[in-house]
Every structure is written in C-alpha cells, then in structure tokens.
Image (cartoon, rainbow, N blue to C red):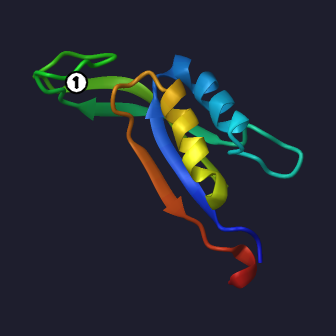
C-alpha cells in the first residue's frame, strides 16, 4: 500500500500558476518518481462578489465579477498536506483562494 495522498485543486490568474507550482513543489507536492511540478491546468472563468470589507486582487467590491483564471490540479502525500497548502497560500495572489483537498484512493487497494 502506498502512502495516503490528497488531490489539491485551486484556481489562479495565469501569471500566478508558475509561482504557485514552484511553491507546491518546494513543499513536496506534485512529485511522481523523478518528476516534480506535476499538475494539470485548464483555463476557465472565475466568478465572485467581494464584500465591502474585501481587498480583491482583481475585480470590484460589491459587484459580481468574472475573471479569466487557470484551474490547477495536483496532489501531495497526506503527511505533506499542511506544508503544501501553506506554501500554496503564500504564493497565491488572492486574499481568499479557494483550495479543495480531495482524498485519493490507493490504486493497489482497488
């Protein structure tokens, strides 16, 4: 049985993808064998409405905004998850990035 892993999903502006992947890799995420920075990315449209007290990186307060974003899907060992998420947050330009942590099944156990 392999170590438990998590899938990590977030979205970010296109110019933030490489710094985020660098931070994730430095914390031990996105590693397969001798490969680092392993991730899948796809373009999309992020939608949000910042409140009056928000400090949005992009968009206007009190308005529904739609901005071009890149979805980043990667993974890490569960043991590295706190460090990987902290690194992701530190590299992310958004005040409140959305981060999904999804437990992955062990392929050998299927």
Which corner quadrant of the image does residue 97 belong to?
top left
Left or right of 99 on screen, residue 82: right
* Coordinates of residue 41 in the picture (x, y in percent): 58, 37
Task: From the image, tell me which residue sits under label 1.
Answer: 65
- Number of numbered discs: 1
Residue at (27, 19) in percent of width and height: 56
Residue in the foreground of this view, choosing between 51 and 44? 51
* Coordinates of residue 15 in the picture (x, y in percent): 54, 17
Establish if 77 lies above or below 38: below
Q: Quadrant of the N terminus?
A: bottom right
Residue in the foreground of this view, choosing between 78 and 31? 78
Residue at (36, 31) in percent of width and height: 45
Residue at (53, 38) in percent of width and height: 86
Q: Secondary structure at mark 1?
A: strand
Establish if 34 lies above or below 101: above
* Coordinates of residue 13 in the picture (x, y in percent): 46, 22
Residue 45 seen: yes
Residue 42 seen: no
Q: Quadrant of the C terminus?
A: bottom right
Left or right of 74 on screen, residue 43: left
Residue at (66, 68) in percent of width and height: 4
Q: Residue furthest right?
A: 34
Establish if 81 lies above or below 41: below
Which corner quadrant of the image does residue 107 belong to?
bottom right
Number of residues whose C-alpha sits closer than 10 Å to that of mark 1, classed few (under 14), some (14–19) or many (20 or more):
some
Establish if 54 lies above or below 84: above
């Amino acid at each position: 049985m392999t170590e438990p892993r998590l899938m990590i999903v977030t979205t970010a502006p296109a110019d933030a993808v490489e710094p985020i992947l660098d931070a994730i890799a430095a914390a031990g995420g996105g590693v397969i064998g001798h490969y680092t920075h392993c991730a899948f990315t796809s373009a999309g449209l992020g939608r949000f409405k910042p409140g009056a007290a928000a400090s949005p990186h992009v968009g206007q307060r009190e308005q529904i905004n739609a901005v071009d974003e890149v979805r980043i899907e990667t993974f890490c060992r569960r043991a590295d998850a706190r460090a990987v998420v902290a690194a992701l947050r530190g590299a992310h330009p958004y005040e409140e990035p959305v981060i999904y942590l999804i437990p992955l099944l062990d392929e050998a156990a299927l």
